[in-house]
Structure formats: structure tokens, C-alpha cells
Image: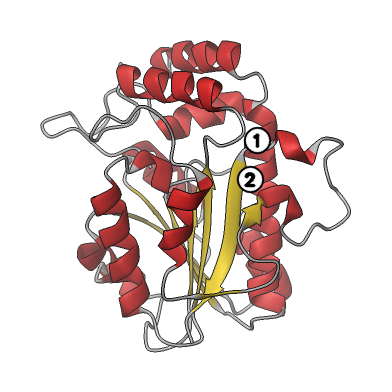
Amino acid sequence: MSPSKPGRPRLDTTVPSAGRITDYLLGGKDNFAADRETAETVLAIAPELPMLWREGRRFLSRTVRFLAEEAGIRQFIDLGCGLPTYGNVHDIAQSVAPEARVVYVDNDPMVVVRGQAMLQDDERTVVIEADVREPEKLLSHPGLTEMIDLERPVAILVLALLQDLTDDAVATQVMDHLRKEIVPGSHMAISHPVCDLCPERTAKLSMVYQDAGAIIGPRRENLRCKAEVEPFFDGLTLVEPGFVYIPYWRPDGTMLPQPDAVWVVGGVGRKD
């Protein structure tokens, strides 16, 4: 989810979008010249980025399956969902529990239009346009409240999103509000790229994304480190194996030959 600049047109194809950059990195076609130019720049810095994003999708798959199969969750909210790709949340959740309901949320109008077109005949899955920086409006959006009953347990997925909220106070406020509004038995899943393993590389990547306008917010010199991400789980009980680099979160037999090359951390927390 790429925060919008005040006054920017709703869809400005001359300014790269983090979501469309990722689409290009994964071989998609829903991107523009500005996205492709920035993507090639970041690939020159970190050729492993497509692998990282694929690992992120595997982490999503394992977390959603855990939430549906073991935690018994039947309601899912996917924040900053990005453009549709393989292994979407509703595909996984509804393969376990056909009655599961899913709301995808993004503030990129291109993402919303594409998702709504793909899911127009799905009675249990919707895509809404909302900004995660306004969690009160997000959770009261009619498209969400018609599908999700916040008086019952829900899973909120915050995957590869918080790095776009460069202001720590804003990111914390968002997470605090979401946690406060969900009932006991609900879960929150978080993943976040971090700078611990390759700080020089992630610093360069941060500068490219910020200079290109793909991430809007207070300028920061690098990604958060693992210790700075963990407090987003405050108030939640981490399920096993805790807060780890994502290849080590309940691996299902598809572990990478070099899992330590993945500089993305994640976990799932339960509200008791």
C-alpha cells in the first residue's frame, strides 16, 4: 500500500507505486514505465528481491492456513493487499473453510478496480479502497462492515506493509487501534523487511523507494531493525514459533537452500 501525496491525482502513472513495482518483480503486467524503471534500479541493488517476495507469499499461505485450520478463524482482513497474484488469501482460507469471509483493503485505485472485477461474483470476498493510516474509517467502511462482524474473532493481515509507514508514531498508532478494536480470540499477522542482515543494501533500497516517491512519509535512513518491529506485537500473545525470519515460521517442507538470505521477519499474535 503506497500512501498518497496530498494533492496527487488518484492514479498518477508517472509516479511509481510500491505495489506495482512488486508486480513487475514477480513477472506481472499491471505496471507502468515509472514502476519498471524503479524496479530495475532496486534489482541492481538487491537481485534477491523477487525471491524475498515469493517467500512472503509462502509465509502468507502458511499463516492463513494456520489461522483457518488451527485457530478456527473464519473472517480475514488483508491490509495493503496489492495486486492479485497466486495464492490469494480467499483461495487459501476458503479451501479450508468455504464459509470464510475475506476483505481486501488497499488505497491504490488500480488495485481496487482489478480486484473488484476479479471478485464481482464472489459473495464472501470483497475489495475496498481505504487508507490504513485512517484505521477508524477503514474498520467502519460499509464494504467491510457488511462482510466482517467485528464482534467475532477476526484475523488482520499486515504483511509487507508497515515498512511503507516510515513514521514510527503513525505505524504504532495504526497497530494500537486495530488491536484495540478486535475481540479476544482474534489474531494479527505481521511481516516486515528489516535491516539487520544487510544494512548497507537495505539503506540503498530505502533511498531509492523514497527518492522515487513510491513511499511517502518522514524520511528515514534505513528500514526498521528486527528489535524495532517486535513492539508491533505488544498486547498480543505470539503463537509458536514466535517472531522469526519468515522461512523459519512453521516451514512446510519448501525451505529455501539458503533461508538466512531472507531479510524479512514475521509472526502471528493472538489477542487473549
Residue at point 56% right, 37% down? 196
Q: Secondary structure at mark 2?
A: helix
Q: CA distance from mark 1 to mark 2?
A: 6 Å
Crowding near pointer 1: few (<14 within 10 Å), some, many (20+)?
Answer: some
- State whether residue 87 is above or below residue 221: below
Whether residue 97 is visible, yes or no, is no
What is the x, y in percent for residue 232? 42, 61
**Between 6 and 161, the one nearer to me in the picture:** 161
Residue 240 left/right relative to 166: right
Give the quadrant of residue 197: top right
Q: Residue at x 24, y 71 (%)?
A: 140
Label 1 close to label 2 by CB (< 8 Å) = yes
Kind of residue at badge 1: Leu
Question: Pointer 2: residues within 10 angstroms few (<14), some, or many (20+)?
Answer: many
Q: Please, which colouring scheme is shown?
A: secondary structure
Residue ID at (87%, 36%): 257
Q: Is residue 168 left or right of residue 102?
A: left
Residue 82 at x, y = what percent?
A: 47, 43
Amino acid beneath label 2: Gly
Q: Label for residue 158?
A: none
**Quadrant of residue 217 in the image?**
top left
User: Which x, y percent locates residue 48?
Assistant: 67, 25
Left/right placement of residue 191 relative to residue 131 reads right
Give the vertical position of 80 relative to 71 (above or below). above
Q: Mark on residue 56?
A: 2
Q: Where residue 120 sits in the image (x, y, percent)?
A: 47, 57
The image quadrant where one finds the N terminus is top left
Picture disc at residue 52: 1
Residue at disc 1, secondary structure: helix
